[in-house]
Amino acid sequence: MTGALTLALLAACLLAAVPVLFLAVQIGAALGPGRRPGPSAAGPCPRFAVIMPAHDEAAIIARGIAAILPQLAEAGRLLVVADNCSDETAQAASRAGAQVTVRRDATRRGKGHALAHGLRVLAAEPPEVVIVVDADCEALPGSLALLARRCAATGRPVQARYAMLAPPLASPADKVSRLAWTIKTFVRPLGSAHLGWPCQLMGSGMALPFAPLGRFDLATGHLAEDQKLGAEFALAGLAPLFCPDAGIVSELPGAEAGKRQQRTRWEHGHLAIIAEFLLPLARRAVARRSLHLLAFTLDLCTPPLTLLALTLLLLEGAGLAWFAATGATAPLLAASATLACFAASIAAAWRRFGRDVISWRELAAGPAYGLRKLPSYARFLIRRRIDWVRTER
């Protein structure tokens, strides 16, 4: 019995080591120079349309529109989808110079439904590329044409760098959250790009080829509609690519309620995506003998960093307790090695990409930040969120 429990604990440690090792490979690759440049972005800009889904964003939408309009030139257009709004989002967007379509359907809520509505409007004059930019984001100059060219040249989705700024008077926990976001949305996809691997879609700043979009059902209320769409593209042989030279910028919510809503939506949505797509993607990667699809699968199914860290600490404690009780060293050694690899990888990412985000002293808030997330992970197992809720800003 003792031997069987030792093997079970060792197996759990080895299973946890898989995403940690993949994370270490991504971060290690991001530290070096890119070896596989993206396809040429020269030549005429293809026809593209920017869809901006917006729900009760009257107070901020003009700023995002102002960043987009100068980038449209003759090839682009902007369509704002005022989705189930109770404020003057549509009027504010129209005054700012955007084309606006209004959607009202209280029974079908969520960004996916808004995107599907926008695509139906665009179908009358279909563009070659659709670029999604959220209403709380600003597209950096030159980013839209670059995304459109890369997408048209490859026929695959292309994801811009999605930077998240800390709110005013940011707490150490806010800075830890921003570091985790930087690793997820920049460091890891940059490492994958250097290795020639695909990346995840991130919801905003993603360019999508219009022609194949008809294969997928966007009209869902899924909490992680971006990751779901990226997985469906990958299963169709069109895994997304990362374009770090294009960028969009947003800001973490300042209100505590907004922070909790945003974290819950991201985390519950991500965990649901892992449960839904792990086996289909893994089977397809093996059937195709595709290293790229396997890399996409591992990237998609790497748990949120905080959950992964808490899991590793739990395994370390279990390994230490089992060693004290039985003298078995294998689980403790495996857990310790995996935890050390994870810590070294995060430290390397922080040293190269995160020192302007958070100081090493403030990193001490990391464990407290992780503990604050335990109720959210518990709710996923007991009563996970499945309905979309707008983040309070």
Image (spheres, rainbow, N blue to C red):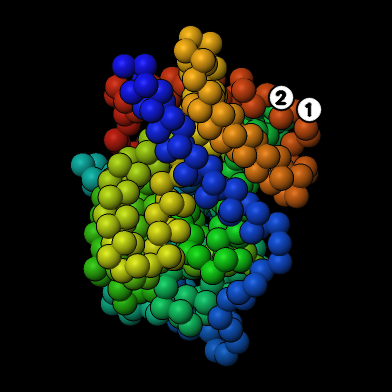
Name which quarter of the figure residue 274 lies in.
top left
Q: Determine the CA span between mark 1 and mark 2.
A: 6 Å
Is 336 above or below relative to 163? above
How many marks on residues? 2
Are circles 1 and 2 on residues that touch, CB within 8 Å? yes
Secondary structure at badge 1 equals loop
Residue 302 falls left or right of residue 39: left
Other-residue count near label 1 (Cα within 10 Å), few / some / many at <14 / 14–19 / ≥20? few
The quadrant in which the C terminus is found is top right
Q: Nearer the viewer, residue 8 or 2?
A: 2
Q: Which mark is residue 361?
A: 1
Q: Identify the amino acid type marked 2.
A: Ala
Q: Residue at x 64, y 34 (%)?
A: 340
Q: Identify the amino acid type marked 1.
A: Arg
Q: Residue at x 38, y 67 (%)?
A: 290
Q: Residue at x 49, y 20 (%)?
A: 328
Q: Residue at x 31, y 61 (%)?
A: 286
Residue 16 locus on image (x, y percent): 46, 36
Other-residue count near label 2 (Cα within 10 Å), few / some / many at <14 / 14–19 / ≥20? few
Residue 390 falls left or right of residue 358: left
User: Which residue occupies the extreme top position in the image?
Assistant: 325
Q: Which mark is residue 364?
A: 2
Q: Nearer the viewer, residue 97 or 241?
A: 241
The quadrant in which the N terminus is found is top left
Q: Is residue 178 visible?
A: no
Residue 7 locus on image (x, y percent): 38, 28
User: Which residue occupies the extreme left position in the image?
Assistant: 107
